[in-house]
Every structure is written in C-alpha cells, then in structure tokens.
Image (cartoon, rainbow, N blue to C red):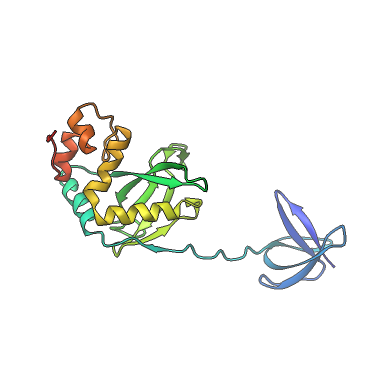
C-alpha cells in the first residue's frame, strides 16, 4: 500500500515497492481516503520502502494578447536611447471593478537588452519597487513582456491584471505620446522619469522639459 509521508515541508509518497518517476499510483491516507497521483523523483529509501516526491502537473500556458504595432513606442525609446542608458515609460493602468468604480495602478516599460531572454522586447514591471531580488535589494515585480510583433505575454504574477494592462498597452501602441503623457497629467509625476512635476507647462503635457528633449516631444506650450 502507498501512503503519504511528510519530508521537511512537502508531502511525499511512501511506496513499499520500487517505482519509477512518472508512474501513476494510488495513495491511501490515514483516514482511508484514496487519491491517484503521478510520482516525481525518489527522495529517500528506508526500511519501509521508497519515498517519492509528487510530480507537479504542468501549468497551463498564460494566454497572450495582441496589443498592436509598436513602431511608435519603439521610436520614443530609440530617440531617448541617444541620451539615456535606461529610458523608461511609466504608464497608468485604470481598473474598473464589479461596482464600476475606477481604480488603478502603474506599470513601467523598458526595452530588454541584448542579453535578455527576448532582446528588444518591452519589459513590463510594476512601477514601485515592492519586491526584493536575490541580493535583498528592492526590485520591481515582473508582469510580462511585449514582443516586437505587438504580443503581450503576461507573467503569471500579473494576478488578474493582464486584461487591463493589455488594454492600456493597446492604447499606448495606437498613440504613444498622448497615452504615456496621461500618467503625468493624472499623477503630477513625469511619465518618463517619474519625477514630481512643478511647472504648469510640465503638468499640462505630463512630462518635464528635459525628458521632452530626450524623447523628442514638444513642451512649453501653455
């Protein structure tokens, strides 16, 4: 009979006979309840038999979404790259709940470098540094990428935010300068460098004069 056995913090399967990873077996609990599972790797051998990890079922792929042609967005980044090492666009993403109340959050867009998994794609992260990396340093949660053909590939940690992010990315692709600048007008912080805006001309367009020069956008018209 195969039974459950806890090793460290994980429940494994104790088998009286030797099995192979990938074998499907029936496990009986102390209450007599049975469950069919797939075995993973052998993690222990003892006088009672062989202990195997429980194989994790493959996760369903995350659905991708087409957000449109990115040439206008990439042109902004290409212009800024002449002045900045790591140009970014901060994008406000509105959400509408079941009661039709409008809330939202902000994401940060950057261009993936040559050593990235998908070079040249747009990296989508949370704007706030609310997580830490392997070195304990503040980091931004990765929410996916937009490939150069205009496909948004959400991260699993997008946690239900993929739909509003995709809608906002589609709006950005259709009118990059206007949609990007909306973040600055709504929040009072530059949509490119996230610095607080103080001049009324900056708050009117959503970015400051320095970023306007870097990204090749007009500024200064009241």
Q: Please, which residue is most extreme toward the top here?
A: 198
Residue 71: image location, x then y, percent: 21, 59
Figure quadrant of the N terminus: bottom right
Q: Quadrant of residue 83?
A: top left
Figure quadrant of the C terminus: top left
Compared across the picture, whether 87 is left or right of 216 comes to right
Compared across the picture, whether 178 is left or right of 60 comes to left
Toward the viewer: 142 or 165? 165
Who's the residue at 30% across and 58% down the image?
A: 119
Compared across the picture, whether 66 is left or right of 103 comes to left
Residue 19: image location, x then y, percent: 73, 72
Residue 130: image location, x then y, percent: 46, 38
Toward the viewer: 188 or 33? 188
Toward the viewer: 105 or 55? 105
Who's the residue at 28% across and 42% down the image?
A: 182
Camera sees residue 113? no
* 39 is higher (above) or lower (below) than 169: below
Camera sees residue 105? yes
Who's the residue at 43% across and 36% down the image?
A: 137
């Amino acid at each position: 009979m195969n039974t459950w056995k806890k090793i460290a913090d994980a429940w494994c399967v104790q088998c009286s006979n030797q099995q192979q990873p990938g074998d499907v077996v029936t496990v009986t609990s102390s209450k007599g309840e049975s469950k069919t599972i797939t075995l993973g790797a052998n993690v222990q051998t003892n006088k009672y038999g062989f202990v195997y990890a429980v194989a994790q079922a493959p996760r369903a792929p995350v659905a991708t979404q087409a957000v449109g042609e990115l040439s206008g967005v990439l042109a902004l980044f290409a212009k800024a790259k002449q002045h900045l090492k790591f140009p970014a666009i901060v994008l406000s993403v509105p959400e509408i709940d079941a009661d039709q109340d409008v809330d939202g959050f902000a994401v940060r867009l950057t261009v993936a470098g040559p050593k990235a998994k998908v070079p040249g794609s747009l990296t989508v992260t949370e704007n706030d540094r609310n997580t830490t990396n392997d070195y304990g340093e503040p980091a931004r949660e990765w929410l996916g990428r937009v490939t150069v053909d205009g496909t948004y590939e959400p991260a699993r940690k997008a946690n239900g935010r993929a739909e509003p992010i995709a809608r906002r990315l589609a709006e950005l692709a259709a009118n990059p300068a206007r949609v990007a600048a909306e973040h600055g007008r709504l929040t009072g912080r530059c949509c490119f460098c996230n610095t607080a805006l103080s001049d009324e001309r900056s708050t009117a367009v959503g970015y400051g004069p320095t970023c306007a020069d870097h990204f090749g956008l007009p500024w200064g018209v009241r």
